[in-house]
Image (spheres, grey):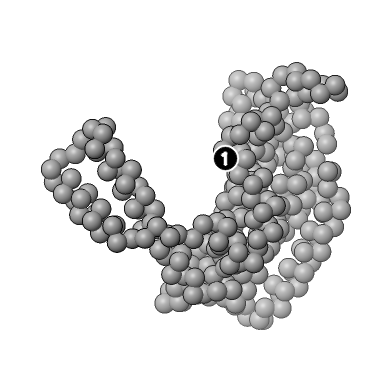
């Protein structure tokens, strides 16, 4: 991998990753792994085409939710790639977790549409959790409300008392999607930067050839660029398969089938090229 110091713009020390000159480094980052970024753009075009070729009925709740989950996953993928360009590797890993959690629900709803009820119940369960916390803040005197506001809050809490906290967690969605291995192997890794555990903070440290810590790394990082891109593409590829039944094109599904086969072969080829 190229020297990371070459990638940072001249004003990086002053402005960090919000440097106005960061757009100038894109060609340099592309040069670090040109075949990977070519595949990134190729898959993005396929996913965008799938988005606009989708025909959904709002009356079909499960289908409609799947489309929205796919849209959320695609936008997450695009945001992740932007972070990769900026050299914000740990932050891009956070979005890999978002991609994965979205994929669990998307695939589970494709395989088992009846789970839409479990999906829809998740919001009132979250509301109940927030309401209980709000109630505690009121009781502690941390927050003050008017009598009218308290009446509204109490009415809301009374309605939420009927809600049972038996929501579907990420592991349950993964099981329903038959992606348990992905959950067990990758989910803990994607969760590390979110929880800021000690091992994750080690990623910001530079060590010498003897393994001794020398200084924090404050410049952009690109040593995990290929791995993060490959993982993001893998998740998006599976997601496209999960909306296959709602993709309608004038010539049928063949164009998408052929394009997906090409990009899947490309992904396998990229795996062989990765610097591990």
The picture places residue 153, in percent across and down from the top left corner, at 22, 49
The picture places residue 84, in percent across and down from the top left corner, at 68, 42
Report the residue at 55% width, 61% height from top.
172
Task: Report the residue that reaches farthest toward the left.
Answer: 147
Q: Is residue 143 above or below residue 61?
A: above
In the picture of the structure, the residue carrying the numbered disc 1 is 194
The picture places residue 188, in percent across and down from the top left corner, at 64, 47
Q: Is residue 176 above or below residue 254?
A: above
Residue 134 seen anywhere in this rendered image of the structure: yes
Q: Quadrant of the N terminus?
A: top right
Report the residue at 61% width, 34% height from top.
197
The picture places residue 81, in percent across and down from the top left corner, at 65, 47
Which of the two residues, 3 or 201, is positioned nearer the viewer here? Answer: 201
Q: Quadrant of the C terminus?
A: top right
Residue neighbourhood size for the residue with mark 1, other residues' Cα within 10 Å, grouped as few (<14), some (14–19), many (≥20): some
Which of the two residues, 135 or 13, is positioned nearer the viewer here? Answer: 135
Task: Report the residue that reaches farthest toward the bottom.
Answer: 251
- Find residue 27 and report its image quarter: top right
């Amino acid at each position: 991998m190229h020297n990371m110091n070459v990638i940072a713009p001249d004003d990086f020390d002053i402005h960090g990753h919000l440097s106005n000159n960061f757009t100038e480094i894109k060609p340099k980052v592309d040069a670090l792994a040109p075949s990977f970024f070519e595949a990134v753009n190729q898959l993005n075009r396929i996913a965008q085409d799938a988005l606009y070729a989708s025909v959904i009925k709002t009356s079909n709740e499960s289908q409609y939710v799947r489309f929205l989950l796919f849209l959320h996953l695609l936008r997450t993928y695009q945001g992740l790639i932007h972070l990769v360009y900026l050299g914000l590797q740990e932050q891009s890993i956070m979005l890999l977790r978002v991609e994965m959690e979205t994929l669990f629900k998307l695939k589970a709803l494709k395989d088992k549409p009846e789970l839409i009820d479990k999906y829809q119940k998740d919001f009132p369960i979250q509301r109940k959790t927030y309401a209980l916390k709000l109630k505690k803040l009121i009781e502690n005197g941390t927050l003050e409300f008017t009598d009218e506001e308290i009446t509204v809050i109490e009415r809301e809490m009374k309605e939420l008392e009927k809600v049972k906290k038996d929501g579907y967690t990420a592991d349950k969605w993964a099981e329903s999607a038959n992606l348990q291995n992905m959950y067990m192997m990758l989910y803990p890794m994607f969760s590390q930067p979110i929880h800021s555990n000690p091992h994750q903070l080690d990623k910001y440290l530079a060590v010498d050839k003897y393994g001794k810590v020398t200084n924090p790394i404050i410049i952009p990082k690109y040593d995990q660029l290929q791995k993060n891109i490959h993982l993001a593409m893998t998740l998006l590829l599976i997601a496209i398969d999960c909306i296959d039944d709602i993709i309608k094109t004038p010539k049928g599904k063949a164009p998408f089938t052929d394009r997906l086969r090409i990009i899947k072969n490309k992904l396998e080829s990229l795996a062989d090229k990765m610097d591990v």
